[in-house]
Image: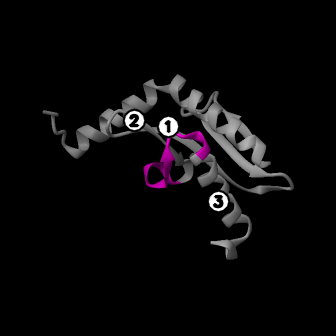
Amino acid sequence: MGQVLSPQMERSVLYWRTRLGRATAVRYLDALSVALRPQGWRFIKYYRPAPLPLLRVYAIGAEEIGIVVSVLAVPGGRWGYHEARRGRRGYLCPCGDTTAAAEVVGDLLKHLMYPSTW
């Protein structure tokens, strides 16, 4: 039977898993960038000196419109893609399926570029 943590303790555990799991986050962001490349999206990798590895995704010719994706630890020993600007509230997709994550990120970017497509 699993141990139940208080919300404050769970946040602390997730924070430290995220900070200590830098190599895992980089691996997931690299996999996402590979999945986004065939769709025509461009990206910039901010892995160092940022405290968290970040991936900025945008379209050619529209560099001012884009999102920044981070990888954060989520409950259950898993990892999830998040919109970095929104932090934990910006959950996009679990990190296991990069094609689904690329589709979610692509749909979000299309909506930002063409708001009537939502």
In this rendering, which labeled residue sits more in front, label 1 or label 2?
Answer: 1
Q: In front here: 97 or 63?
A: 97
Q: In this picture, is 90 found above or below 29?
A: below
| Structural crowding at the residue carrying mark 3, measured as other residues with C-alpha within 10 Å and reported as few (<14), some (14–19) or many (≥20) | some
- Secondary structure, mark 2, is strand
Magenta residues (range): 86-99
Outermost residue toward the bottom in this view: 116
Three-letter amino acid code at the position of disc 2: Arg
Say which residue appears at 54% left-offset and 34% top-offset: 52
The label number, if any, that marks residue 96 in the structure image:
1
Three-letter amino acid code at the position of disc 1: Gly
Mark positioned earlier in the residue sequence (1 or 2):
2
Mark positioned earlier in the residue sequence (3 or 2):
2
Say which residue appears at 69% left-offset and 76% top-offset: 116
Distance from disc 3 to disc 2, alpha carbons, whole Å, reads 23 Å
Mark positioned earlier in the residue sequence (1 or 3):
1
Find disc 2 in the rendering and name its residue: 78
- Secondary structure, mark 3, is helix
Q: Quadrant of the N terminus?
A: top left
Give the image quarter of residue 42: top right
Find disc 3 in the rendering and name its residue: 107
Whether residues under marks 1 and 2 lie with C-beta atoms below 8 angstroms apart, the answer is yes
